[in-house]
Image (cartoon, helix red, strand yellow):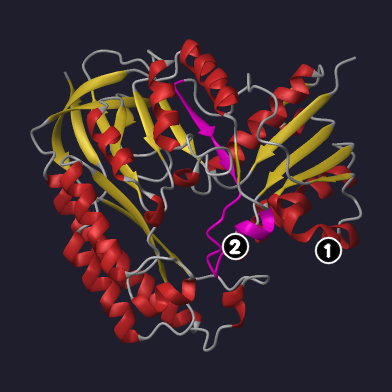
Amino acid sequence: MRRNIGVLSLGCPRNVVDTEVIVSRLKKKNYQIVDIDKAKIALVNTCAFIKEAVEESCTVIRQLIDLKREGKIKKIIVYGCLVERYKNKLLRYLKDVDALVGRISINGVLRNCFITPHYFAYLKICEGCLNACSFCTIPKIKGNFESRTPQSIIKEVRFLDKKGIKELNIVGQDISLYGKDISKDINLTSLLKEILKNTSQIRWIRLLYLYPHNISDELLGLINKEERICKYIDLPLQHINNRILKLMNRKITKEEIIELIKKIRKTIPSVFIRTTLMVGFPTETDKEFEELIDFVKEFKFERLGAFIYSRETQTPAYDFKPQIPFSVKKKRFGQLMQVQQEISRKINERFLGKTVDILIEESQNSHYLGRTVYDAPEVDGAVWVKSNHPLKIGDIQKVKIVDTLEYDLVGEAI
């Protein structure tokens, strides 16, 4: 008799890939994947990057425990980052959990089950991180940096291409380090050339999480040259003040960041740069925050996300003093996002009257929802599309932009 398992995936796209690996392994062993309310066994893949993620994971686990006590499920398996970070505590406090499972090998089973929509996929090419930022828990959770073998990646890419996906999102804690642990002849650029050579159906290849101090001129040249590689650079900078960057252990200076941004925009004239910035890092002064604001105003990032510093145990920054009061951090976050909102509005106005390719993702009454090549799934803006004829979910459609908002666009299908 086939056993029913319900699977929940929390956290980032890298976790999505891990969950898909788990599901693929379970199905290979003849388990049936069902909704939680129909499951006998519940498996939750957790996140523990920051306090809020830990709280979300614990809330979901407690809800599963309630279901178990009510007799609705028989067993609970907790997997992933929360286990890696807090296994001993979980063993003491979560007596109703039947199994705790940590990290799995990234050179494992070929995925054949996906929880993403049929038209796009995440491809994780590496695990762990070498950057050791002072605020980050990833090295403690994920361990040493490990690249997947090119052979396993290309095998999976061929499968995804044959499956007919339109968008491949390449992820990892720092994909710009890819291959460093394998050979001096293997790197992200060489891998991308092989991916391009071995695919024909994939239209958009997107690179997520390129740390600034590892980006090569060769990589930028390839992105500019190859039509199928999105002109989209995800460049998490965190800050711009040199003192704060040093405290963060970011291994790059303000001057080097500015030089890199100018080089990217010169090499790839049509590029959209997405960055992530942190506010309220310990000891950050008003003047240093204003320097960050001035930097954002000057360089006008096409896409920008910000988050409030989270004081995490097992990180060097936990002991930095003084810590910034939450009220100050929240205020700075609001100021930064208000500045970016105006920048984003003006950038979106450039699309007005232009015809662009839109990946159609949802149907809502007489409208459709999609994304441009400059928008990564789940983190960037959307395009509301009006159409006089039916559009197919997962198709890339020509759309004329007729209106613009702060973060989204409005268009008409051609």
In the image: residue 76, left or right of residue 305: right
Q: Residues within 10 Å of mark 2 (few under 14, many from 20)?
A: some
Q: Do we see residue 242 in this rendering?
A: yes
Tell me the quarter of the picture where residue 261 sits.
Answer: bottom left
Which residue is at the front of the view, 373 or 344?
Answer: 373
Q: Which numbered dot is residue 156?
A: none
Of helix, strand and loop, which one carries label 2? Answer: loop
x then y, percent, for residue 283: 46, 85
Q: Is residue 120 magenta?
A: yes
Which residue is at the front of the view, 247 or 31?
Answer: 247
x then y, percent, for residue 380: 35, 45
In the image: residue 273, left or right of residue 49: left
Tell me where the magenta segment starts and ends, as one range. 119-141
Question: Which residue is tagged 1?
Answer: 89
Tell me the quarter of the picture where residue 149 sits.
Answer: top right
Distance CA(mark 1)–CA(mark 2)? 17 Å
Q: Is residue 183 magenta?
A: no
Residue under the point 50% across and 32% down: 122
> Mark 1: which amino acid?
Lys
Of helix, strand and loop, which one carries label 1? Answer: helix
Q: Do we see residue 364 in this rendering?
A: no
In the image: residue 139, left or right of residue 4: left
Question: Which residue is tagged 2?
Answer: 50
